Image: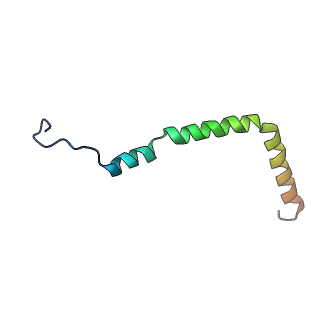
Amino acid sequence: MGRSGRPVARPSGARAVRTLLTDPVLPVAALAIAAIAAALYAPMLTWAITGGLAGYSLSGSV
């Protein structure tokens, strides 16, 4: 029992799952890995984006 005389609440299974799903560690780690991969492949990504935009504009879609 707690100080107020009420039983101390234990975290339920749903609360534990919610805590794991909302913990920011996994998204931050995924973004960090994506940033490193983007930095390593920057020249290739730059040309891919430029080529995609050129193809889009030359196709008459603009």
Could you tell me which residue is drawn at 45 percent across and 47 percent down? 21
Residue 56 sits in quarter: bottom right
Residue 54 sits in quarter: bottom right
Could you tell me which residue is drawn at 82 percent across and 48 percent down? 48
Q: In this view, does 60 lie above or below 25?
A: below
Could you tell me which residue is drawn at 34 percent across and 52 percent down? 14
User: Residue 7, position in %: x, y?
Assistant: 15, 43
Q: Which residue lies furthest to the bottom in this view?
A: 60
Could you tell me which residue is drawn at 34 percent across and 48 percent down? 15
Query: Where the N terminus falls, by quadrant?
Result: top left
User: Residue 47, position in %: x, y?
Assistant: 84, 44
Q: Is residue 25 left or right of residue 62?
A: left
Q: In this view, does 5 lie above or below 60?
A: above
User: Residue 25, position in %: x, y?
Assistant: 50, 38
Residue 9 sits in quarter: top left
Q: How many labels does the image show?
A: 0
